[in-house]
Image (cartoon, rainbow, N blue to C red):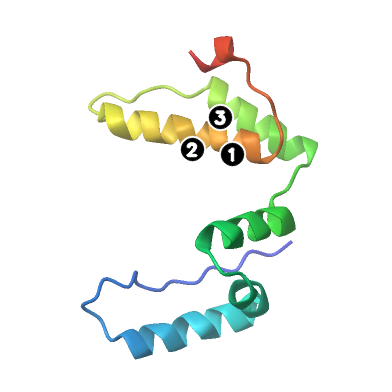
């Protein structure tokens, strides 16, 4: 499976919205996601829909995520809030592929 990478600046209110919108639509069309994005009414519904379409639940993905969790360590000089954010992201990734993590393992 090939991966395609698109770079587009975040819309921050400073750049030209019309140009940004055209670029975003072009990316959505190229990736075949335009229909998915336009049919959902909320961002929450969109994320849920994309998750059901593309979140992989294969054993290898689960194992890689578990390995990342168990090898997860705080780097010297890293901010605690960044470390906690990364930890929660790992837990959410495991939750998305329906892997249950015991409370004991989350400590």
* In the displayed structure image, the side of residue 24 where residue 67 appears, left or right: right
* First in residue order: circle 1 vs circle 3: 3
State the SS at label 2: helix
Residue located 47% across and 24% down the image? 72
From the image, tell me which residue sits under label 1.
93
**Decide: marks 3, 2 in contact (CB < 8 A)?**
no
Q: Tell me the SS state at disc 3.
A: helix
Note whether 64 is above or below 14 in the view shown.
Answer: above
Whether residue 100 sits left or right of residue 18 in the image: it is right
Q: Is residue 13 above or below residue 23?
A: above
Q: Residue 56, how many percent across, how many down?
A: 73, 48
Determine the residue located farthest toward the right in the rendered image: 59
Within 10 Å of disc 2 (Cα), the crowding (few <14, some 14-19, many 20+) is few
Residue underneath mark 3: 68
> Who's the residue at 56% across and 20% down the image?
70
- Where residue 28 sits, quadrant-wise, is bottom right
Q: Nearer the viewer, mark 1 or mark 3?
A: 1
Q: Nearer the viewer, mark 3 or mark 2?
A: 2
Distance from disc 3 to disc 2, alpha carbons, whole Å, reads: 11 Å
Residue 39: x %, y % from top left: 64, 75
Residue 89: assigned label: 2
- The image quadrant that residue 3 belongs to is bottom right
Image location of residue 79, percent across then percent down: 25, 30
Q: Is residue 29 left or right of residue 106?
A: right
């Amino acid at each position: 499976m090939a991966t395609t990478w698109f770079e587009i600046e975040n819309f921050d209110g400073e750049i030209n919205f019309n140009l940004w919108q055209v670029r975003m639509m072009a990316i959505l069309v190229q990736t075949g996601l335009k229909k998915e994005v336009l049919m959902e009414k909320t961002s929450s519904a969109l994320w849920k829909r994309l998750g059901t379409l593309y979140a992989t639940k294969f054993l290898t993905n689960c194992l890689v995520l578990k390995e990342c969790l168990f090898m997860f360590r705080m780097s010297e000089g890293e901010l605690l809030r960044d470390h906690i954010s990364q930890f929660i992201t790992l837990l959410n990734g495991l939750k998305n592929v329906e892997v249950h993590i015991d409370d004991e393992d989350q400590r």
